Amino acid sequence: MPHDFMPGLAGVPAARSAVSDVDGQRGVLEYRGIRIEDLSARSTFLETASLLLFGRLPAKLELERFTSDIALHRRIKYRIIDLLKCLPEQGHPMDALQAAVAALGMFYPGRNVQDIDNNYWSAVRLIAKLPTIVAAYARLRRGDDHIPPRDDLNFCENFLYMLTDSVPQKVWSHTLDVCLILHAEHTMNASTFTGMVTGSTLADPYTVVASSIGALKGPLHGGANEAVVHMLREIGTPAQVRPYLKKKLQAKERIMGFGHRVYKVKDPRATILQGLCDRLFRECGASPLYEVALEVERVAAELLRGKGVYPNVDFYSGIIYDKMGIEVEFFTPIFAIARVAGWLAHWFEQLQENKLFRPDQIYEGEHDRPYVPIEKR
Ligand code: SDX
């Protein structure tokens, strides 16, 4: 039975899922039924990853075991380091991450996705190794040696240590952990859907995650956090916000970090990130970008009134990473370090009753055209 064509599959259910839910009218996001406000205030990224993957909050011993499994798999093969060394220094870190993750699967046997135990270890390796890959490329591309993870540091402390060669202050590692919770999962977004299409062919999880990374990179999706900071720097001061936005909207251009296919109110994650900014900049010093961002939100609310266009998760996240001294090209890789938990949760779920994704199309071409020999064209 033909269905109506919906551009971008807007509003079309592509799966049944219990991993997360978004109420775009009320601005509510739940992971496995738990509100994002509760998780960001009380959980950790690894506890949230376990919740997403296995459907419930882990007991103390389960969390300790999962945390230990992740810690034991942070290191990457020297050949992956060699691969990263061969990549161009000016390459985008999302391309390096995608290349390294696709290669990662070549080092681990038993990619039979019907093996639940093997799938667990694949998920552990991917969650554990993405931060190491991202940090390694950040250092290698500027000519520094990569820094191996330390066993005495937690997930976020290690990422910042491998990136900067110094153990971060608690305020930074905790702030990053909250950011990872906020970016871990978001129902049927483009990168999750991409991974599910790849996973529906029974491809291995490294290939699934590599395909999701490709989708996340785009500026309409995860790449927006990088574009937001470029925009804020281009605006420069709060006084320049109004003329800048007016010019952009008159040119029918999008304001990066604003709008959402599902949220028609402010993204609850943007609200939580703004609270993080307030606390962080009070404790660690103001960010000029934040002052510009606040004015962008105020003026955009006026210029876009009634269109249901509000700040999304990408609007304030980059300002936090910028304050941490992280290069802007590494903002989307940080998004990927978090979202790999959601991608893998959906992959686990779809394998329980997999169906190959193969949608239809509405053909608008011609039929029965003759083959014209080249001398007669
Ligand atoms: C993420 O799906 C997810 O859940 C994604 C995500 C996740 O956690 O996985 O939440 C993460 O990707 C957040 C989105 C990050 N992208 C950006 O910030 C890029 C800027 N945003 C837009 O490109 C846009 O809002 C989208 C792509 C996010 C959603 O666009 P839609 O649903 O395709 O809607 P649309 O582009 O057709 O816009 C509808 C109307 C239009 O007005 P009209 O032309 O009909 O009059 O809203 C306007 C648009 O002009 N609009 C915007 C706007 N976004 C929508 N106007 C100005 N600036 C914007 N950013």
Image (tube, rainbow, N blue to C red):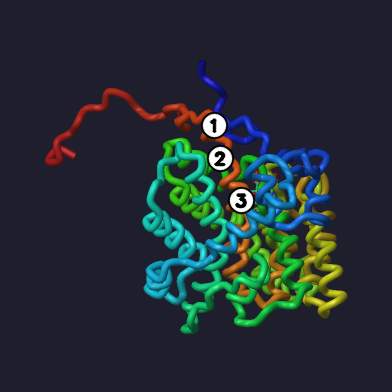
Which is more toward the observer, 108 or 202?
108
Evaluate if marks 1 and 2 touch, with contact meaning CB atoms under 8 Å apart: yes
Q: Secondary structure at mark 2?
A: helix
- Residue 149 percent location from the top left of the image: 56, 72
The residue drawn where x is 79% and y is 51% is 39
Binning the other alpha carbons within 10 Å of mark 2 as few (below 14), some (14 to 19) or many (20 upward) gives: many
Quadrant in the picture for the C terminus: top left
Measured Cα–Cα span from mark 1 to mark 3? 17 Å
> What residue is rendered at 77% in x and 73% in y?
170
Mark number, residue 199? none
Q: Name the element at disc 3.
A: helix
Tell me, for residue 348, which label it has, or none. Answer: 2
* Label 2 vs 3, first from the N-terminus: 3
Q: Position of residue 132 (x, y in %)?
A: 54, 68
Category of crowding for the residue at label 1, using alpha-carbon neighbours closer than 10 angstroms: few (below 14), some (14–19), many (at least 20)? few
Q: Position of residue 5 (x, y in %)?
A: 55, 28
Q: Is residue 369 above or below residue 117?
A: above
159 or 20: nearer the viewer: 159
- Report which residue position mark 1 lands on: 352
Task: Indicate the secondary structure of the residue bearing disc 1.
Answer: loop
**Disc 3 designates what residue?**
341
The structure residue drawn at horizontal position 49% and vertical position 72%, both measured from the top left corner, is 137
The residue most toward the front is 61
Few, some or many C-alpha atoms within 10 Å of disc 3 (few <14, some 14-19, many ≥20)? Answer: many
Going by the numbered disc 3, the residue's amino acid type is: Ala
Q: Is 39 above or below relative to 99?
A: above
